[in-house]
Amino acid sequence: MTLPDALYPPLNLPAAPLRLRGSLSEGGRPEVYDPLRRRWVALTPEEWVRQHFTAWLVAAKGYFAGRMANEVALTLNGTSRRCDTVVFATDRSVEMIVEYKAPSVAVTQAVFDQIVRYNSVLRARYLVVSNGLSHFCCEMDYGAGSYRFLPDIPAAQALT
């Protein structure tokens, strides 16, 4: 299937072996199979980023897909929200949360504010934001009440 670069541009991630179906012709919507959710989902520009990023975490960074979940529900101030991707530690605590934006959406302070709000519930060690072109990761230090930006997303073996 050929996808228009305007909606699905090349990303700053390796190509992922995506399973696609559907068509853009005659108003159709393409779908992608999400191996983490084990179902077909609409291929939005944000989903394009999510599928490439999660495939990269598994293939290049050594994360175990069985400890990752997409669209994880949480309750924040009495409102239901969905965290884009959660990476769990072996004890099922939340190790990392990832927030995605479409490639056309700039990664701004508002995006970081969103993931920090989610983290007030999940208390992850790592917070990651990506629009597929730019990726940012910070490590939380709850003891010191601070955080620091990392130069790269840590490999799975670096997580405890």
Image (spheres, rainbow, N blue to C red):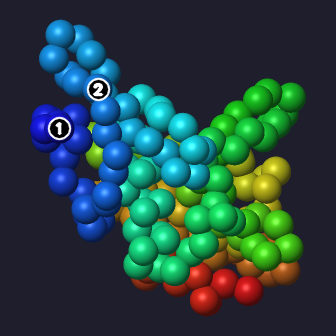
11 or 116, nearer to the observer = 11
Q: Quadrant of the N terminus?
A: top left
Q: Secondary structure at mark 2?
A: loop
Q: Which residue is mark 2?
A: 22
Task: Write down the quadrant of residue 45 in the picture.
Answer: top left
Residue 107 appears in view:
no
- Furthest toward the bottom, the residue is 158
Task: Write down the quadrant of residue 91 in the picture.
Answer: bottom right
Task: Write down the quadrant of residue 4 in the picture.
Answer: top left
Is 61 left or right of 115, judged from the image as shown?
left
Question: Which residue sits at x=31%, y=39%?
Answer: 20
Q: Is residue 53 above or below residue 142?
A: above
State the CA–CA distance, disc 1 to disc 2. 8 Å
129 or 3, nearer to the observer = 3
Is 149 left or right of 30, judged from the image as shown?
right
Is 158 left or right of 54, judged from the image as shown?
right
At which x and y percent is residue 155?
Answer: 52, 83
Q: Quadrant of the C terminus?
A: bottom right
Circle 2 crowding by C-alpha within 10 Å: few under 14, some 14–19, many from 20: few
Q: Is residue 84 above or below residue 88?
A: above
At which x and y percent is residue 101?
Answer: 42, 44
Tag on residue 1?
1
Circle 1: residue type:
Met
Question: Which residue sits at x=59%, y=65%?
Answer: 65
Circle 1 crowding by C-alpha within 10 Å: few under 14, some 14–19, many from 20: few
At which x and y percent is residue 135?
Answer: 40, 64
Question: Which residue sits at x=42%, y=74%?
Answer: 59
Asked whether the beta carbons under mark 1 and mark 2 sit within 8 Å of each other, the answer is yes
Circle 2: residue type:
Gly
Question: Which residue sits at x=73%, y=55%?
Answer: 119
Q: Secondary structure at mark 1?
A: loop
- Furthest toward the top, the residue is 26
